[in-house]
Image (cartoon, rainbow, N blue to C red):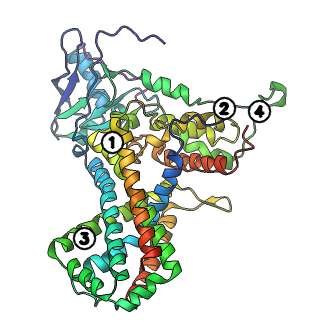
Amino acid sequence: MAQESKRPFEPFVWLMFSGGGVAAALVLPVLLFLFGVALPLGWISAPDHGHLLAVLRNPLTRLGLLGVCALALVHGAHRFRYTLHDGLQLQRYDGLIATACYGGALVGAAAAAYLLLFAL
Amino acid sequence: MSAPPYVRLYKPKVRMLWWLSRRSYTLFVLRELSSVFVAWTVVYLLLLVRAVGRGPAEYQRFLDWSASPWLVALNVISLAFVLLHAITFVNLTPQAVVVKVRGRWIPGRLLAGSIYVTWLLVSAFLIWLVVG
Amino acid sequence: MPDQITMRVARYRPEQEDTPTFDEYDVPLRKDWAVLDGLNYIKDELDGTLSYRWSCRMGICGSCGATVNGEPKLTCATFLTDYAPGPVRIEPLANFPIIRDLVVELTDFMHKLGKVRPWIIRDEEQTVEEGEYLQTPAELEEYKQFSMCINCMLCYSACPVYGLDPEFLGPAAIALAQRYNLDSRDEGADERLTVLSQPEGVWGCTYVGECSRACPKGVDPAGAIQRYKLTAATAAVKSLLMPWGRR
């Protein structure tokens, strides 16, 4: 008996949401702390450009960072969509909201893929 | 099933600011709003990647821009929300994921604790990677 | 300790008013009195027109749910002294239509409970001669927590998603579905999957967690729902990668 679900992609999005939540939780805090707070405030000296470039060019870094970015964006999109439902009671516009949120995540992931795979 | 003949049911409406009425609701909405700052962090990191890819001059320009007071303030707030996300996500994991080892359930605190340890190890590794 | 406490009780008399109002009653403050005892005192001594549900007065029948100072509680399990010096506000359970005073309309939940088929489903029933379905204590532990539900609806009252979207299946219904899904004697998980995997099934839940906080029996419906999301997602992936082999 097939699942007669009105929206069959929901379980897959949820899996990506969960994975994105883990990825975001493990990786983003320290990176944001380093590059968003510690470095600008001078708590640590800026890493040498050549060194950063070498780290980023490593295929493992490229793929790992791409995975984290894409999943974290899906996580954020999924959560924000439901925040609009619960917080602003906009559930009746869900078609529009879902398209905007996941579409945005897709655009972001594509940008990440371009930057990490072709622009380094 | 036919409904009993009530005089008139009163159907209460949910207020727009329902989430301010209880501390746990407010915390929930803040936790959900962390999604915006998670997305911003990704964008910010991608801007850094782009700057690095474009050469040392662009990289330096990014570093200067990142020191702007408003941006530092934004990133401090983002860091707070990203940490809120991380902590609430890890703490809720044992409720959602039940792991059995040799017929016995792993206690929730052990599961959450091991994720926190992983978090520390990953963070230490990333610091070494970037700074070292 | 003062010897009286004021109870502000929500009243709704549809034959004479359009919206609920509040009536105040001064009730003896006895250290062993629950809110329910206060309500019974009001009905016996002060105002016989007050309407409310109650039965066992010991937290097992699930009849006496109400909103006490903004929180969903069983009135038989909530003590007046915890709210001294008062006043303490008693309102009907949130998120349900109000019939009269503290009595709410629960038919929606009864429908939803039926939808998840909360009974043992077998492909083939054993005959009486074959005896009982045997179960080890370990197998019982798998679902025992979810069988503690007394259908008191405090979780629905606490759940903001249910308040915003009455189509949502809700915590108790999903927890009860899990109670049977995890029961080793049951073979009906596939049937329940269809209902639970609808958008207004488990996927409507945004893991607020208030349902588990409100539950007086420690059922942890939030945990049941998140665990089921993983089950349903795994089933979806399996049916995508291996579309054959489904009954």
**The magenta stretch spans residue B69:** no
| Residue C145 shows in this picture | yes
The answer to whether dots 1 and 4 both sit on one chain is no
Residues rendered magenta in the picture: C49-58
Whether marks 3 and 1 lie on the same chain: no
Front tag of 3 and 4: 3
In the image, what residue type sits under mark 3? Asn
Q: Residue at x 34, y 89 (%)?
A: A47
Mark 2 or 4, nearer chain start: 2
Q: Residue C114 at what x, y percent from top left?
A: 54, 25
Q: Are marks 3 and 4 in contact (CB under 8 Å)?
A: no
Q: Which residue is mark 2?
A: C120
Q: To which residue does mark 3 refer? A: B75
State the mark number for residue C132: 4
Label 1 and label 4: CA atoms lie apart by 47 Å
Q: CA distance from mark 3 to mark 4?
A: 63 Å
**Quarter location, residue B55:** bottom left
The image quadrant of residue C44 is top left
- Contact, CB < 8 Å: mark 3 with mark 2? no
Residue mark closest to the camera, 1 vs 4: 1
Q: Amino acid at mark 1?
A: His
Q: Which residue is mark 1?
A: A85
Contact between labelled residues 4 and 1, with CB atoms less than 8 Å apart: no
Q: Residues within 10 Å of mark 4 (few under 14, many from 20)?
A: few
Q: Residue at x 44, y 63 (%)?
A: A70
Residue C148 visible (yes or no): no
C-alpha separation, residue under disc 3 versus residue under disc 2: 54 Å
- Closest to the camera, between mark 2 and mark 4, is 2
Chain bearing mark 4: C
